[in-house]
Amino acid sequence: MKKVACLLILLSLVFSGFAIAQDKVEVNAQIRPRTQFDAKDFYSNTAFYSYTELRSRLGVKYSPSKKLSGFIQLQDSRRYGTEASTLSSSRNLDLHQAYFKIKNFFGLPINIKAGRMELSYGAQRLIGAVGWHNVGRSFDGTVLTLVTKSLDIDFISARVNETGLVGDSLDQFLFSAYGNIKAISRLNLQPFVIAEKTNRNDFQRFTVGLHVSCKDKKKAFQHELDAAYQLGTQKTDQSISAFMVAANLGYTFNAKIKPMLGAGVAYLSGDDGEDASKYKVFNTLYATNHKFYGYMDYFLNIPKHTYGLGLMDIHAKASIVPFSKFKLALAYHMFNANADYTLLDGSTSTSFGSEIDLTLAYKYDSNVKFVGGFSFFAPGDIFKETKGEDSSMWSYVMAIVNL
């Protein structure tokens, strides 16, 4: 009943807003069905498992003045056929975002944004909205933005976990400062500090780093660099010392089919287990990892999915526009660990395997886009022993309809 009531309130706001002042109300919606054909279990005798997901979003932005606005977005995420019958109703409705924003708070060069919201910074290697996911990521908290002529800084305070118990040690907090240096006109230059802590005294992690990328996305030559270092303490007596470096280069040729070639490398440190007093595994925090480490999502949860060994991802990509409104893209990843994995026969290996991702996108019109893809993964020694010796495959078709 509570979720139904929220929907009714939102709809009332929509219609009343249109009736009172249409120029102050913006309504947006998205419907995204996606069918997947999954054979990612590394066993060739297993047939494809198919299923269809549906994500539906309805958002309303109301701006009673130039300095005040509010946004509410409801979301339903489901999988076709999971209800008990066609007369059943699953409770999938959720409040994905609900926040207000005040510009020039108390006449100061500060903007405040508070509530439930998506957060995306840099290339989303550490904090991202995970748009591919059928739910997506939201944070509950506040963002204070200091706005100056040469520098903007977002100060983030969010509650990541709340048990509802007084003084509970499992409550977790996120504090961050993300800068955007505007003085350099050609580059996105974004230094940052991300702090995480719990009420326990045995976990406190700081991530400091820098994101650099080309500001003009229409330029032929594109580049991107992310570097971060993690420090702090966990398990009371274990110090954190980990790092990440990622670089991407791409060039689009001046031709009718717009051929693009690119390459890059990402290095995430791992732990060889030789020094128990130090934790050397880099954690990607709240990243949109689907965007970077292969579309088959074998490395979504880092460091869990890398067994704490770190990750070296060497990749190449290419794309063309063969016809009007069509784009064909191909990516190749070679995944290796940065610390030795001991196999059952006593030998060691650093090979996770390699992946090929083929994607075809068609822009039907300004509101509708169709996307399909096929991926193939050849396991290396580590995945052969932990997952299976056969290659794996996965494909999908998806429609993105913005209303």
Image (cartoon, helix red, strand yellow):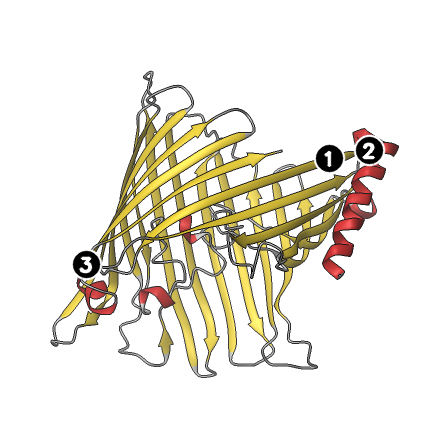
The amino acid type, in three-letter code, at marker 1 is: Glu
Of the two numbered discs 3 and 1 on the same chain, state the one appearing first in sequence: 1
Report the residue at 81% width, 38% height from top.
15
The Cα–Cα distance between marks 1 and 2, rounded to whole angstroms, is 9 Å
Question: Can I make out residue 313 in this image?
Answer: yes
Q: Which residue is mark 2?
A: 18
- The residue mark sitting in front, 3 or 1, is 3
The Cα–Cα distance between marks 2 and 3, rounded to whole angstroms, is 57 Å
Report the residue at 51% width, 47% height from top.
131
Near mark 1 (Cα within 10 A), the count class, few <14, some 14-19 or many ≥20, is some
Report the residue at 56% width, 55% height from top.
137
Q: Which residue is mark 1?
A: 26
Of the two numbered discs 1 and 2 on the same chain, state the one appearing first in sequence: 2
Label 1 near label 3: C-beta < 8 Å? Answer: no
Q: In the rendered view, would you say 354 is above or below 19?
A: below
Q: Which residue is mark 3?
A: 390
